[in-house]
Amino acid sequence: MNTLIQEQRPAILKRHVAAVVAGNALEFYDFVTYSFFAVYIGRTFFPSTDPSVSLLASLGTFGAGFVTRPIGSYVIGKMGDRRGRKPAMVLSFAMMGIAIVGLALVPSYARIGIAAPLLAILFRILQGFALGGEVGPTTAVLLEAAPPGRRGFYTSFQSSSQGLATLAAGIVGFVLSDLLNAQQLQDYGWRIAFLLGVFTVPFALIVRRDVPETLAREETSEIAGDNAPMRPLLVVAVIGVFMLANGTIGTYIRNYLTTYAITTLHMPANIAFAATVVNGLCTIVFGLWSGVLSDKLGRKPVMLYASVLLLALIFPSFLVISHYRSTVTLLGAAALLSILSTVSIIPMIAWITESFPARIRSSGLAMTYAVSISVFGGTTQYGVAWLIKKTGSPLAPAWYWMVAAVVGLAAVIATNETAPHKIAATPRLSPEPAQPLSSRAPS
C-alpha cells in the first residue's frame, strides 16, 4: 500500500518547498518581532513609573501567546493529519494575519485606557493559537517532500526559516532604531515593524494554496492509535519535550539579547538589534549545515556533541558579555551561542518528526513542540527579566539556560538513532520504520 501512496502523491517541487519555508518564516517574523520590541510595546500598553514593571507586563503579554499554542497545535495539527497538510497551513497563516493586523493597530493605553492592553493580549493569544498549528503541518510537508537520505536537510528548513524570520526582524529593528529616536520607536516605530509583515500576508496565502498535498488519502484511513502501540509514541513525545526545552529556552534567551543589551547592559539600540541580525544569520547558515551533517553522521551524534559544547560555553559567554559590554563581545557571544544552539536543535526536530507515523505526524510533532514551547518558551523571557530584577546579576540568563541545557542533554542521551542510513544498527522507539516513503516495502 505504501508504494501506491507514494505513486499517488503529487511531486513536490523546489518552489513548493520554498513556499512552505517562506510562509513559516513570515509567521515566525510576526511572532518574534514582539520580543524584539518588548520595551516599547510595554511603554505603549503598560505605562508605569518603573520601567522594569512595564517590561515585565509586556513580557507577560508575550508569554500569553504561548498559552494557546498547545490548543492550536491540537486543533490545526489534527486537521493536518485528517484533512491534509495544505488546508492546515493556510488556516494557520490566515489566523496569524488577522492577529498581526489587530496588534499593530491597537491604540495606546493613553488613548483608550484598559482596553488597549486587553486587546493586545487577545491578539497575542490568537497569534499563539495560529503558530501552534503551524509547526506540525509544515514540518510534515518538508519531511514527506524529502528525497531519500535528505530528511535532516529538508526538515532543517523549519528552524532555518525561523532564523530567517529572526534575521528579517533584526534588520528591520536595526534600521528603525538607526533612523528613529527612542520616543519615535515607542510612538510608532514598533508598529511599522509589525505592518511590514502584514503586507506579505496576501502573497503568502496565494503561494501556500499552490503547494501540493503530501498526505495521501490512504494514510488517513487509520485513526491514530488504532494500529500502533501508544506507549512508545508517548516516550517519543516526552523525550521530545525535554530535548526541546533546552532548544526553546536557548532560542528565547538569544532572542532576548536585544532587550537584555538595552535594559541590562545599557547599550545602544542599534547595537542590540545587530545581535539579533547575527543570531538570525547563524541560525540560517548553521541550521542547514546541521541538517546535512545529521544526514551523514546521524541525528544523535550531532545533537550530543553540540549539546555538550553548548553547556560548557553558556556561562563563559555571558561572563564576557556582562564584563566588557562592547559591540565585539556582544556580537561574538551571540554568534557562538547561536551556532551551537542551532546545530543541536536541528536534528531534534528531524528525530521527533521521523519518530511519529505519517497518520499522526502533524499533530504529534505539533503537540510535542507546542507543549515544550508553552511550558518553557513562554516563561523564559519573563523569568530571566524577573531574575535579573531580583538578583541584580547580569549572569541570570546564563544560569537559567544552563539548567535547561542539562535537562536537554539528558534527553538526548536517551534517544535512539532515526537517520535512515543508521536505522539498521539502532532499534527505534516508534513502531514505524524510518525509511523514506519511496524506500518502504509495499504492504
Image: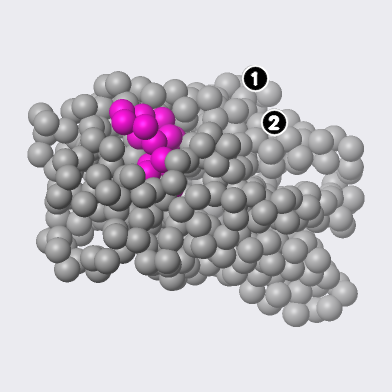
Disc 2: which residue:
274
Q: Residue at x 89, y 37 (%)?
A: 179
Q: Magenta region: which residues?
A: 140-156
Q: Main secondary structure of the magenta part?
A: helix
Q: Which mark is residue 328?
A: 1
Q: Position of residue 365 (x, y in %)?
A: 35, 54
Q: Nearest the camera: 83 or 95?
A: 83
Question: Which of 103/439 is in front?
Answer: 439
Q: Which residue sits at x=66%, y=32%?
A: 277
First-in-chain label (1 vs 2): 2
Q: Position of residue 441 (x, y in %)?
A: 16, 41
| Callout 2: SS | helix
Q: Position of residue 293 (x, y in %)?
A: 35, 22
| Side (left or right) of 428 relative to 171 | left
**Relative vertical location of residue 146 with respect to residue 93 in this rendering, above or below:** above
Quarter location, residue 250: top left
Measuring from the top left, give residue 297's x and y in whole percent. 27, 22
